[in-house]
Image (cartoon, rainbow, N blue to C red):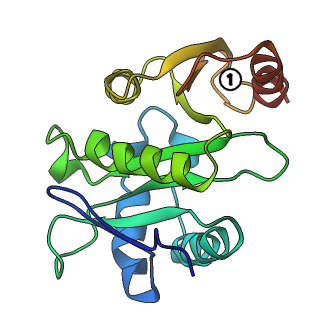
Amino acid sequence: MSPWLHVRTERLHLDLPTGADVDDLFAIHSDPELWRHFPVGRHTRREQAEEMVRQSAWQFETHGLGFWSVRDAADGPVIGRGGCTHPTGRPWWNLYYRFAASVHRRGYATEMSRAALRAAHAVEPDRPVVAYLLEHNTASRRTAEALGMTLAWRGPDRPNPDPDAVRLVYVDREPSAALVAAIEVHALA
């Protein structure tokens, strides 16, 4: 059993998602305001939130770490989702953060992400942590930079229906040439 299933930060409760979190997770991931930077990523079916819960359980069981449901009180609603996962076939951890619009600008993404970085470094310290974001998403970029992450790659966002979209990839350490090449292959696929 992973020691990272339940983590407390100064203000946040980070927990393995359960079926009880599905409605809150769906509300967050289906909110058009939260997807204005990447509208096609918005969830349209509750089953997508159910799958997020299943995937988190699998990630924690398989890799010792995954995405948490985030609360700002032990018995409160889910206000966000985030953490690190181990993408299949990739030599890095993927850092992710998404929070309800009602709690933006409180520093929760940075606080949760600091815990995720600590966890990833504890579970597999030699595996870099990357954060993918769109260049025009300045709030996400500020979070990555506040964590001390470094821009490792900038280029077209191939799967994005917006042909002008630019993808930024940040990494938690000085990126090796091999890591940058792997990021580029993944980003341009």
Comparing 33 with 20, the one in front is 20
> Amino acid type of disc 1?
Asp
Instruction: Give the labeled residue for mark 1.
Output: 157
- Residue 151 picture quarter: top right
The local secondary structure at tag 1 comes to: loop
Residue 79 on image: x %, y %: 26, 62
Report the residue that reaches farthest toward the bottom: 20
- For the N terminus, the quadrant is bottom right
Residue 62 on image: x %, y %: 71, 71
Residue 140 on image: x %, y %: 38, 30
Residue 90 on image: x %, y %: 79, 42
Image position of 110 (left or right of 17): left
- Residue 24 picture quarter: bottom left
| Disc 1 crowd, CA 10 A, few/some/many (<14, 14-19, 20+) | many
Comparing 65 with 98, the one in front is 65
* Numbered circles on residues, count: 1
Q: Residue at 43% across / 18% down in the picture?
A: 136
